Image: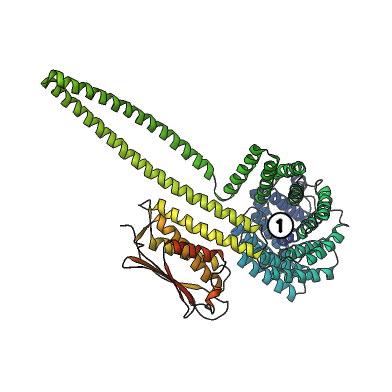
Amino acid sequence: MNCLSRISVGVFLLLLCHAPSSGQDRDVPHLKEELTKDPGDSLHYELRFNLIQAYANRGDLDSAVFVARQAFADDYTNADNNRVGQINYTLAYAYDINDQLSIALDYYDRARQAYQQADNHMWIAGSINAMGTANYFAGEYGEAIRLFLESLTYAEEHDLILEQVESLINVAAVYDETDRTREAIRHCQRAAQLQQKLGTDERLGYLYIYLADYYKQLDHLDSTFYYLEQAEGIFKDDDVNPEMLGSTYTSQGSALLEKGDTALAKQKLQQGYDILKNSRANIPALLFNLTQQGSIALASGNTREAKRLLEQALNFTQDSERHEHKLDILNLLQRTHFLNGDLRKAYDHLASYADLADAVRTTDRDEMIAEMQAKYDLHQQEKQLEIQRLKIAQQASIRKLLIILAAILLVGILGLLYFLRSKNRSNALLAEQKMIIEGALQEKEILLKEIHHRVKNNLQVISSLLSLQSNSVEDGVVKEVLKEGQDRVRSMALIHQNLYQGKDLMTVNTHTYFTALIEKLVRSYSINRDTEITLDLDIDSFDLHVEKMMPLALIVNELVSNSLKHAFAEGNGDEDQISVVLQESDKDLILRVRDNGSGIADLSLFGGKSFGYKVISSFARKMKAQIDYLTDSGFGVEMRIPNYLPTT
């Protein structure tokens, strides 16, 4: 799902549609004043109910809970199951928006039970849907879609068209979030058909925007433009939410830019900006609009205009918590300043980009490293002063020794005694130097561990940046290439992690490393699989120098990844298995990776121009390895690496 789609996702619509409302004034001081006038039971309930909502929206959870308990204590509330359901639902909403998922789910369930007692079918479906919504925003997509489908079934059984629309929107949102775009389109189209029965309104416009975005993800631009035109027709008549028309124009401009029609894209983006600039209700859409305009200006060589637009967008990020917008803007700004020849500002924006990208994933990592670096630099300065002092002392000792030798020649025995005495002093000084050198070696070991740690962290940052880049790429082939790059970077990062965690800073244990690497790869590729992949690992335990481990690790990464991507067909009914053998044989090392998958009928299809095959071939030549292909019962590769002995 791209950043523009998140302007108003279907699940958020559900919360807006199902947040209980009575139409009364929700200003807290006014509501509290009205409660002191001792109104009748019905109005008294309405005032308390609205006061709970007002506290919830202000984030004052304790006050919302306190008023709810007062409402529950009233006889006129407990006698009406619909009112009990409303209070529980509103409390659930309060906990939900304050990120207390487990408590929110409990109150949503209480609300559903109360509505069941009242036989209120609409709110039963709404409560189930709200439980799915809470799980969705918590990232529990499996439980979310189960609840959304349960709500959809219930709404269909009771002929609740509006609730069916909302459930279908939410199901589509989950499918889109999990990269099942075609399923998202199918459910969203069903929602649009049902919404048309209810009549054209703002919700139908939202549905058209979702459909346009889903088709854009599939590169079906004709369908994208069709649905955006439909949305434009609806939002043109909407005087309440004009920013949605601005968002629609922005989407049209983005799609036209992808189509290659830069002139018309610029016109549509300007139309969108003219509307969005007067509204703070849709900052993400405004940021996306300005970023797109800045990209166009930069591509056309108008760096001055690009700078103006992007700096304006950067100012708006102060009101937005969406880091992906700010990252895009900083990246474009550094390119703009670079083309203008302002290398200092280009560097500043690039540094800000790197800092923000790192901060999203590792809290205060840069501050910690800077502090450690400062301490290390200070310690090094002290050591340099100490070494300098010792050098001066050593030079003085040598001068004294020469004087003593001369004195020996002159004064004989007296000089010899003096020499022996000085020699004792020199031995003491050498012992002191030895202690200093041993301390320096220990410090070097600590520094080497820190270097391995930093290399591992930097590789993780690179992996995260590749992941971030893949999220903004829609081409499936490019996504796959970026994922393969991530796997290779992670395999190298794991080596440095083992180095700084181990006792020997230059060697890695084969059994520990390859077991962890292969299991991580299998978990990574098994996310979207219905069947489990079993591993048969026979890996000898010995230590290899990091220079020998690195090419071997990359070869294993490529071979196991190749099996995970290409060997197994979904639904074949067989147990999918990958076996990896790493053993010593005389002075050689045997590596065998094979699977029980569909195999390769024509060996010429394996390798070719693929980057992974080039990696394997390059390292195999470097290690003078012999390669054999195993084609019985699946596919495998066996390598015999001569004189590849472990470190002893």
Q: Is residue 50 above or below residue 189?
A: above
Decide if residue 119 is in sight here. no
Task: Residue lying at the far top in this picture: please name it.
Answer: 411
Picture residue at 55% right of the left edge, 47% below the top: 363
Q: Would residue 410 appear left or right of 590 to someone viewing this image?
A: left
Q: Quadrant of residue 511?
A: bottom left
Q: Tell which of 369 and 322 is nearer to you.
A: 369
**Residue 472, image x, y percentages:** 66, 57
Q: Would residue 607 appear left or right of 267 to someone viewing this image?
A: left
Dot 1 falls on a residue whose secondary structure is helix
Task: Residue lying at the far left in this picture: please name it.
Answer: 413
Q: Tell which of 194 and 594 is nearer to you.
A: 594
**Residue 321, image x, y percentages:** 67, 48
Picture residue at 85% right of the left edge, 59% below the top: 232
Q: Tell which of 301 and 507 is nearer to you.
A: 301
Q: How many marks?
A: 1
Picture residue at 64% right of the left edge, 55% below the top: 95
Q: Quadrant of residue 647?
A: bottom left
Picture residue at 43% right of the left edge, 63% below the top: 514
State the quadrant of the N terminus. Answer: bottom right
**Residue 304, image x, y percentages:** 76, 41
Q: How is the image coloured?
A: rainbow
Q: Would residue 224 appear left or right of 608 to someone viewing this image?
A: right
> Mark 1 is on which residue type?
Arg
Callout 1 crowding tier (Cα within 10 Å): few <14, some 14–19, many ≥20: some
Q: Is residue 587 above or below residue 419?
A: below
State the quadrant of the C terminus. Answer: bottom left
Decide if residue 308 is in sight here. yes
Q: Tell which of 262 and 399 is nearer to you.
A: 399
Q: Which residue is mark 1?
A: 6
**Residue 272, image x, y percentages:** 82, 52
